[in-house]
Amino acid sequence: MPETYTAVLDRFEESTAVLLLEQDGAQVDEITVARGMLPKAGRHQDAIFELEISDETVALRYQKQDTEQRRTDAQSRFDSLSSELPDERPGAE
């Protein structure tokens, strides 16, 4: 029976891609695959894939909407946190 994961492209190491595997929002493992195995649209850092592993075969499907949503969510969290920082310029109140 195949196992399915959410895989996030963490980095490239020469001709391989390092994917962080997630289940239920938690990182559970990492694998490396040949860069050429990645769909062209997903050959960038933080791209999200649906990864299916079964009997020594690996299938990757780029999840464009999930990738864009995660990027938007991360930017929103950053913007929220940065707006809460005190202004430390001299004379600022």
Image: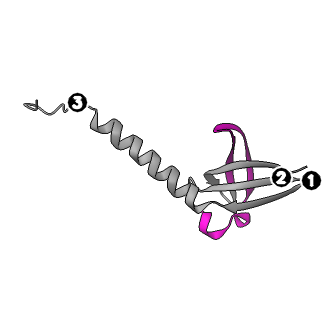
Q: Which mark is residue 55?
A: 1
Amino acid bearing label 2: Ile
Instruction: Kindly identify the amino acid type of the residue bearing the numbered disc 3.
Output: Pro
Q: Is residue 24 above or below residue 86?
A: below
Q: Secondary structure at mark 2?
A: strand
* Residue 53, numbered circle: 2
Cα distance between the residues tagged 3 and 1: 54 Å
User: Horizontal placement of 7 versus 56: left or right?
Assistant: left
Label 1 – label 2 distance at C-alpha: 7 Å
Q: Residue furthest bottom?
A: 40
The Cα–Cα distance between marks 3 and 2, rounded to whole angstroms, is: 48 Å
Instruction: Find the magenta span and give its range.
Output: 17-44
x then y, percent, for residue 36: 71, 67
Residue at image location 41% in from the left, 48% down from the top: 75
For label 3, the residue is 86
Q: Secondary structure at mark 1?
A: loop
- Please rate how many residues cluster around mark 1, counting C-alpha atoms within 10 Å: few if below 14, some from 14 to 19, many from 20: few
The mark that comes first in sequence, 3 or 2, is 2
- Magenta span has 41? yes
Look at 90% across and 54% down and name the residue there.
56
Residue pictured at 86% horizontal, 51% vertical: 2
Q: Is residue 25 magenta?
A: yes
Splitting the image into 4 quarters, where does residue 92 fall? top left
Q: Decide: few, some or many residues near mark 2? Use Cα within 10 Å; few <14, some 14-19, many ≥20.
A: some
x, y percent for residue 16? 70, 57
Instruction: Name the image quarter holding residue 20.
Output: top right
Residue 90's spot in the image, x, y percent?
Answer: 10, 31
